Amino acid sequence: MALLTRYWLQKVLFLLLPILIGTLVTRRTTSAPDCLPLHDQSIQTLQDFLQNGTLTSEELVQIYLHRIEESTAAFHPVAEINPRALEIARQLDVERRVSGPRSPLHGLPVLVKDSISAHGMNNTAGSLCLVGSKTHKEASVISRFRNAGAIILGKANMSQWGNSRSSPKSQSNGWSAWGGQTLGAFYPNQDPRGSSSGSAVAMSLDLASFTVGVETVGSMICPASRNNVVGIKTTSGLVARDNVIVTKMRGSIGPFAKTIRDAAIALSVMAGKSPEDPTSQEIPFESIPDYEKLAGWRIFVQSDSLFHNMPSRTHLKDFEIVISSFRAHGATIIDDVNYSSYDRINGPSAPQQYVGPAEYKLDMAHYFRGLEINPFNIQNIEDMISCTKSIPAEYYPSRDISYWDTVRKAEDVLSEKVVAGIKEMRYLGGAAGIDQVLDASGADAIILPSIICADVPGLVGYPIITVPMGFSLSDTPVTLNERGNLVWDGPNIP
């Protein structure tokens, strides 16, 4: 289930906190080996353990490293381990004893998507062409974590280049030449969905205290939904995106966690401005306000979506339970406003079909220019293509470059066509989309099934919060992805 709005999350971050316990979020342990005695423990509980001496950060890192080692052969969620993780943990243990914790994240390990630059590790977007490269400085979100005392445990695997290389029939979610094939843990050979798949699977398997992903359209919300974890796609710019491989106009960075509260704690550290990300300068507040009550909130529900887009009868029943929980906590449910833009944003003539490639072309070139070390001297899309074709382990042409063929033909982002397309996208996602619904209904937020929620916010960089909500029925037929190598849907998948 996903919650959408247009705000900078200052109004909705804690919207779901009062109903975390009970019928709203149904949790199920994954099939991973249960060797972690701290399984499903919250950030606050882990901090209590660290503070009272039940364990140290060094021991916590060792536990996670052991769990990563056990899960790698089956699920491949982690691409690289920070070689200094244990050393940093020991330093933070000493600091805790001497002067106390810096923040609620002090001494807690985090895995970040392999498109977020962190010095001491590769930042590859899953490509062998970027192994050994280094940005002039690490991403400011990483610096925020370090300053808060969090431990960068390693890099989570991802769908190579954010699923922006190949055609759907050629690619598979969770695959990269650098990190291998990530799999979901709820069914054999499960498609993990989305490009932040490694981060979501790692969270579902308790491989870190929390994890971090990146999204433009669906890259966090889809894997969070299908791996039974909470995911927050933030407003574009709420978390500064400098030195991150992402589209700058609409892309965003956000946390994965086991609970809304944990995700909120992580986001309170992540959020903030950077001089290298102009959009972040538009943040209208310095810290995330604490909003914890549903009373007086008006929630819009698209009735048709409940019946036509639910994966199963179980999901529909769970969704209805969620709506009842919102009502019980004082929210007003509205379902009589037309959410009209969804049917207009797809198809070959939709503006994102040509705006997206133009953005991608510009943003990739900008990232490459910021590399201090660039072993293959990648400067543009043509260099990306040449390098990929030259390395056998990139599996070209089995995994094609059809999206890149589109990108290299893309018009300049300042061309008349692309500028007009950007305006149309903002209209479809805003005035004729989310803004239309919120204004017409007087609602504060929209609730939709996660399976259909990402497209409209993705047009304008609006935020989404998704939470776990049940599992498919045990008799659900098994279907495969377009490449035919992963289970797209099947029994007991979230």
Image (spheres, grey):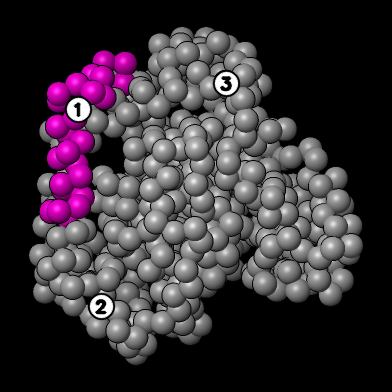
Q: Position of residue 79 (x, y in %)?
A: 64, 37
Earlier sequence position, callout 3 versus callout 1: 3
Does residue 386 show up magenta in the picture? no
* Circle 2: residue type: Arg
In the rendered structure, the answer to whether residue 456 lies left or right of residue 488 reads left
Q: Residues within 10 Å of mark 3 (few under 14, many from 20)?
A: some
Residue 352 quadrant: top left
Q: Nearer the viewer, residue 308 or 155?
A: 155
What label sits on residue 298 in the rendered view? 2
Q: Amino acid at mark 1?
A: Val
Q: Which range is magenta?
A: 407-433
Question: Is 410 included in the stretch rendered in magenta?
Answer: yes
Say above or below: 198 vs 221. Answer: above
Relative to the observer, which residue lies in front, 395 or 80? 80
Image location of residue 127, percent across then percent down: 54, 25
Cα gap from disc 2 to disc 1, whole angstroms: 36 Å
Q: Secondary structure at mark 1?
A: helix
Residue appearing at x 45%, y 38% in the figure? 277
In this view of the protein, can residue 187 be seen by the observer? no
Q: Position of residue 141 (x, y in %)?
A: 57, 45
Q: Which amino acid is tagged 3?
A: Leu
Taking the spot 44% from the left edge, 67% from the top edge, the residue there is 13
Query: Mark 2 or 3 closer to N-term?
Result: 2
Q: Which residue is mark 3?
A: 371
According to the picture, the residue beneath numbered tag 1 turns out to be: 418
Tell me the crowding category of disc 1: few under 14, some 14 to 19, or many 20 or more residues within 10 angstroms, Cα based: many
Residue 212 or 318: which is nearer the viewer? 212
| Element class at badge 2 | strand
Residue in the image at 14% along x and 40% along y:
424
Query: Which of the image's four quarters has the N terminus?
Result: bottom left
